[in-house]
C-alpha cells in the first residue's frame, strides 16, 4: 500500500543527500509539498508527519483547504495567478512563486498594502523562451527588475522556473543553471541580493539542488500519482 509517511521520509533523505553532495546543508532547501488535487484528508496525513509548508496552484482549492486544515500551516501559491484573484490569495498564502509580470507585481503590492500584508514572492522566469509558458523573459526581467524592487510591500526572494520537458532528463540541469545565472546577473545589475531559487519538482529536484535550488516543489513523489482532475 502507498505510504505518505514513507514517501515523505524518502524525499527528505534524497534532499539531504543531494545537498551533502555539493557541500550544502539540507536546511538550506525548503520543501514545498505540492498538495494540488489532493483532499484535506490526504493532506492531513502529511501534517501528522510534522510537515507545515504546502503548495497549491488553484485559488479555489486553496480557499477550501487552507481554512479546513490547522492554522499553523504555511501555504505557497505556485500556479498562474490572475490579477482579479490576488485579493483572495494574499490572506491565505504567504508566498507566491509565480509572479510573472510587472503588472501582476504592482497589483499584489497594492492589495498587500490594503490588507496590511508583506507577501514573499519569487519572480517566475522563462529562460528557455517557451511561448506557451508564463514567466518573464530574461530581457523583460532585466528591464523591469528596478521597478519590481521598488515595490514596498513585496519581499522578492528570487527567481522561480519550470523547465521544459527534455528528451534527456539530465539536460534539465542546464535549465536550472540558466535560472541561477540569470539570478546572478540580476544581483550584479541591481546590487540587491536575490538568494531564492524555487526550482525542482518530483523528477528533477536532485539536479536542481546541485544547481543551487533553495526551494523544491514536490508533489507526486510525496502524495503519489495525481488522479486526472475532474471538471
Ligand atoms: C504540480 C506542480 C509541481 C509538482 O509537480 P510533481 O511533479 O508532482 O512534483 C511543482 N511546481 C508546480 C508549479 C506545479 O504546478
Image: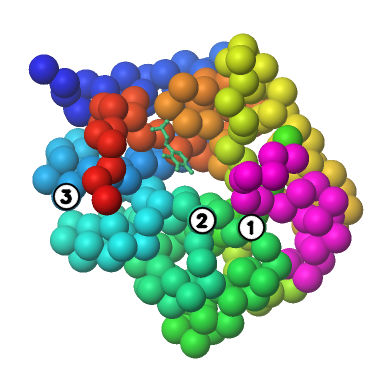
Q: Position of residue 134 (x, y in %)?
A: 62, 50
Q: Is residue 26 above or below residue 66?
A: above
> Tag 1, which secondary structure?
loop
Q: Which residue is mark 3?
A: 40
- Sequence order check, earlier mark of 3 and 2: 3
- Crowd band around label 2 with a 10 angstrom C-alpha radius: few (<14), some (14–19), many (20+): some
- Quadrant assignment, res 156: bottom right
- Crowd band around label 1 with a 10 angstrom C-alpha radius: few (<14), some (14–19), many (20+): many
- Ligand 1 in which quarter: top left
Name the residue located 62 percent from the left edge and 45 percent from the top edge: 133
Name the residue located 61 percent from the left edge and 15 percent from the top edge: 167
Q: Which residue is mark 1?
A: 100
> Tag 3, which secondary structure?
helix
Q: Is mark 2 within 8 Å of ligand 1?
A: no
The dot on residue 80 is: 2
**Residue numbers of the magenta segment:** 129-149
Q: Furthest residue to the front?
A: 231
The quarter of the rendered structure image containing the N terminus is: top left
Q: Is residue 134 magenta?
A: yes
Q: Nearer the viewer, residue 216 or 194?
A: 216
Amino acid at each position: 500500500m502507498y505510504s505518505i509517511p514513507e514517501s515523505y521520509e524518502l524525499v527528505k533523505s534524497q534532499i539531504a543527500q543531494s545537498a551533502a553532495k555539493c557541500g550544502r546543508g539540507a536546511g538550506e532547501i525548503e520543501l514545498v509539498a505540492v498538495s494540488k488535487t489532493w483532499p484535506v484528508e490526504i493532506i492531513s496525513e502529511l501534517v501528522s508527519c510534522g510537515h507545515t509548508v504546502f503548495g497549491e496552484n488553484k485559488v479555489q482549492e486553496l480557499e477550501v483547504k487552507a481554512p479546513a486544515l490547522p492554522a499553523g500551516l504555511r501555504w505557497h501559491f505556485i500556479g498562474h495567478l490572475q490579477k482579479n484573484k490576488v485579493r483572495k490569495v494574499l490572506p491565505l498564502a504567504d508566498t507566491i512563486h509565480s509572479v510573472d509580470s510587472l503588472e501582476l507585481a504592482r497589483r499584489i503590492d497594492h492589495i498587500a498594502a490594503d490588507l496590511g500584508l508583506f507577501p514573499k514572492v519569487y519572480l517566475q522566469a522563462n529562460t528557455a523562451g517557451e511561448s506557451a509558458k508564463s514567466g518573464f523573459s530574461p530581457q523583460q526581467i532585466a528591464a523591469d527588475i528596478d521597478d519590481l524592487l521598488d515595490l514596498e510591500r513585496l519581499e522578492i526572494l528570487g527567481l522561480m522556473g519550470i523547465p521544459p520537458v527534455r528528451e534527456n532528463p539530465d539536460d534539465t540541469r542546464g535549465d536550472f543553471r540558466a535560472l541561477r545565472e540569470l539570478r546572478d546577473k540580476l544581483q550584479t545589475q541591481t546590487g540587491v541580493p536575490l538568494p531564492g531559487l524555487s526550482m525542482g519538482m518530483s523528477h528533477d529536484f536532485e539536479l536542481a539542488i546541485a544547481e543551487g535550488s533553495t526551494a523544491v516543489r514536490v508533489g507526486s513523489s510525496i502524495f503519489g500519482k495525481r488522479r486526472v482532475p475532474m471538471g
